[in-house]
Image: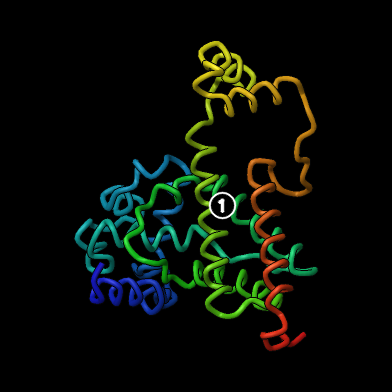
Amino acid sequence: MDSAGVERSLELLWSGRARGRRGPRPQLSVARIAEAAVRIADADGLEALSMQRIATELGYSTMALYKHIPSKDLLLEVAADVGAGRPPELDGGFRTAVRQWVGALWAGFLTRPWILRVPLDHTPVGPNQLAWLDRLLRPLLAAGLAGAEARAAALHLTAVVRGTAQISLDLAGPRSDGELARALAAVLDPAEYPALTAVHEAEAAGGPGYEPEGLPAELAFGVDRFLDGVEAWVTRTSPVRPVPEP
């Protein structure tokens, strides 16, 4: 998206969400349109979302909606920001705070999986999504990461949670993990897929696995090892870094 497009997104997401004046019938606004879009997506999925459907629900014409939000792409962007909600307050030390953030983002994606279907053509700039970023940057900076490092770490964690949630939802279905493992075991050739075969055999044997607290196993192992790496990096480079304020 070009700079003009980003400016239009900023205008809608920040200054265009004020509610109308009090009265028997609230005025149409970006906020009302976005809230209706979220209700529809929650109920029937992203495929059901259209300007016509929102117009019918709010009792306005489609053209009236386009005067506030001029395209479907911008509608999805605003709806995704409203649907994201506000981030949780974080407490505890660095690891605890980051894991709380990861768990909350994960839960949000599972509650509103349609957000994962909204296409991204630029960095999210809405107030809610920037609040999520700000909340994550706080413990990363407090741990001793420099500004650019903290942003890179936050981007990585966001991508990990989003990607893992996307894969989990895409793979969810009536077939259980056990059934899938048995089906794969029947077709895997150990000579061609030695590592994958070894992993399947170890899982089938019920060997020791990672047992995290507070996060699903498919997410927690990678997040915890990433946090190990951040702590090791800060420790290794701390002599040349300014000491972070408490």
Which residue is painted at 57% across and 45% down in the image?
A: 110
Name the spot of residue 102 as percent of width and height, x first: 64, 57
Tell me which corner region of the image, top left, top right, bottom left or bottom right, holds residue 164. top right
Q: Which residue is mark 1?
A: 161
Which residue is painted at 27% across and 68% down in the image?
A: 68
- Nearer-the-camera pick, 24 or 97: 97
- Nearer-the-camera pick, 30 or 114: 114
- Nearer-the-camera pick, 108 or 122: 122
Task: Reply above or below: 110 against 27.
Answer: above
Tell me which corner region of the image, top left, top right, bottom left or bottom right, holds residue 185. top right
| Kind of element beneath mark 1 | helix
Q: Is residue 101 visible?
A: yes
- Nearer-the-camera pick, 141 or 185: 185
Name the spot of residue 148 as percent of width and height, x first: 52, 77
Name the spot of residue 161 as percent of width and height, x first: 56, 52
Residue type, numbered disc 1 = Val
Looking at the figure, which quarter contains the C terminus? bottom right
Residue positioned most to the left: 63
Looking at the picture, the colour scheme in use is rainbow
Which residue is painted at 57% across and 27% down in the image?
A: 196
Q: Is residue 27 left or right of residue 112?
A: left
Residue positioned most to the front: 191
Tell me which corner region of the image, top left, top right, bottom left or bottom right, holds residue 78. bottom left
Q: Residues within 10 Å of mark 1 (few under 14, many from 20)?
A: many
Name the spot of residue 77 as percent of width and height, x first: 37, 61
Which residue is painted at 67% across and 61% down in the image?
A: 229
Q: Is residue 100 visible?
A: no
